[in-house]
Every structure is written in C-alpha cells, then in structure tokens.
Image: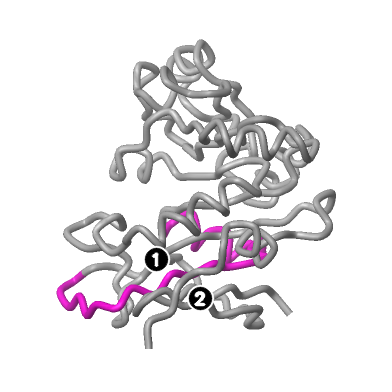
Amino acid sequence: MHAELPPRAQLIERYRVSDRLTPRVRVNFIASLDGAATHEGLSGGLNNADDKIVFDTLRLLTDVILVGAGTVRAEGYGGIRLSAEDDAWRVARGLAAQPSLAIVSGRLDLDPGHPVFTNAATRPIVLTHAAAPADRRAALAEVADLIDCGKDAIDPRLMVSGLAARGLPQILCEGGPHLFGDLIEADCVHELCLSLSPVLEGGSAGRISVGATAATRTMELLHVLRAGDMLFLRYARR
C-alpha cells in the first residue's frame, strides 16, 4: 500500500510546537535501516523528495538552525534562505521572515568567504568559547555575530540559553553527530525527528550521534508518518 505525506498545512500542524517561548532543541537526522547516518559520506545520499518536504517544514517552524562547523563543510551548506511563500507564512504568524543560522565551532576553522556567510539571508551566529583563536575570531566577526558559550570549551547548555537570550528559543539542530552527542550528554535534546530511509547501507558509516560518554535519555513517540517506504518518526523527551 502506497502512503503519502499529508498536505503541507496538516504537516505543519503535526510538527507544530504549542509553546514557542520555552527553549526547545529539536534535532533532525536521517538514517538507514541498519543505522548508518550517511551514504558515501553524506547524509544527503539517504534522502528523497519527501524527506526534503519534512526538512523544509522543520526549518519553517524554527527560530534558529543549529549546525556544527564540520557539517557546514562536509554537507556543502550555502546561504540558508526559505522560499518567498515560507517567508510570507512566517511573517503572517509573527515570526522573523527567515530563521537565523548558528554555527558551532571551538577552533573557528571557518572561511569568512564561505557561501554560508556570503549568501546568508540573515547575519549568521557563531557559537564558540572564550579561548578560541583571537585572529580567527576577528576575521569571523566581520561576517557573523560571535557568542562565547564557555571559557575553554563550548557548553551546550550555554548555547541554548545564549540563543534564547537573543529571542531564538526554538532551535533546530541539523548535525553533525558530534554536536548531537554533546547535546545528548548535556541533556539538552527535547525532541528528535528521525527520517528512516528504506535502505541497508552496510560498510563503516557512523551513527547519527557520537559522544565521549554514554548518556541514556528516554524518549516518547509522538507520531509516525509514512511516504512510500520512508518513515518519519517524531520523538520527545518524557
């Protein structure tokens, strides 16, 4: 039996958050049936058009997109810009026309000339720590707002509170696995939206989260959507 995603308005309702003022970290990932986070090194190798619809819906509903510097480089992030239709939808509901982008980097090994900065719809944010290299800090300050989230290392809890203090409490994390692992360890993950791709990947591809310390967090299933053989799972912390 073939199944399709619900119409966009219903899909938005399925992923809507009723309390937008309370800080909430929603993580979005895709994985193969055997747990691989990538195909040939990229998560994009696992997705399809239906996954893109869910992906765009989650971006539509967020205040800020959170992503690690390594993922920006590996996945070829450019300037994030929602469609004119989504822009109008957000403005009509009292949201900023475009979500902000926050990049996590302790070493600040980012090129100020990267498209993620030069083609951005809004001035990006870089989340770092006070001990980050001063020369790289100065270079990136030309193209982004820097926020220190710790003295010698980045504290995920300070990332969340720092973004909320800027009026960006609804946070959508798009990876990578190390950032997800850090958020789990710090108990900062409120929700996981997982796309389950109908493939067996094999090989040595990593998981969607990687952390130095195991940290078990119990989740509750909120919904399951199906489009063809792809499943879209939404989980929240109990």
Q: From the image, tell me which residue sits under label 2.
A: 214
CB of mark 2 within 8 Å of CB of mark 1? Answer: no
The total of numbered circles placed on residues is 2
Q: At label 2, which amino acid type do we have? A: Ala
Q: Which residue is drawn at 31% across and 58% down?
A: 43
The local secondary structure at tag 2 comes to: loop
Q: Is residue 127 visible?
A: no
The colour scheme applied to this rendered structure is one colour
Q: Distance between the residues labelled 2 and 1?
A: 21 Å
> Residue 64: x and y, percent?
62, 41
Q: Residues within 10 Å of mark 1 (few under 14, many from 20)?
A: many
The answer to which image quadrant residue 186 occupies is bottom right
Residue 230 % position (x, y): 38, 75
Say if the magenta span includes residue 138.
Answer: no
Q: How far from the left and from the top, in percent, is residue 101?
A: 55, 35
Q: What residue type is labelled 1?
A: Ile
Nearer to us in this view, 14 or 101: 14
99 vs 14, nearest the viewer = 14
Instruction: Give 88 or 52, whichever is nearer the viewer.
Output: 88
Residue drawn at x 33%, y 73% as measured from the top left: 197
| Position of residue 184 in the picture relative to residue 2 (left or right) | right
Which numbered disc, 2 or 1, marks the residue closer to the eye?
Answer: 1
- Range of residues picked out in magenta: 177-204
Q: How crowded is mark 2: few (under 14 residues within 10 Å), some or many (20 or more)?
A: few
Image quadrant where one finds the N terminus: bottom left
Q: Residue 86 carries which label?
A: none
Residue 116 vertical placement versus 27 (above, below)? above
Residue at 39% x, 66% y: name it. 30
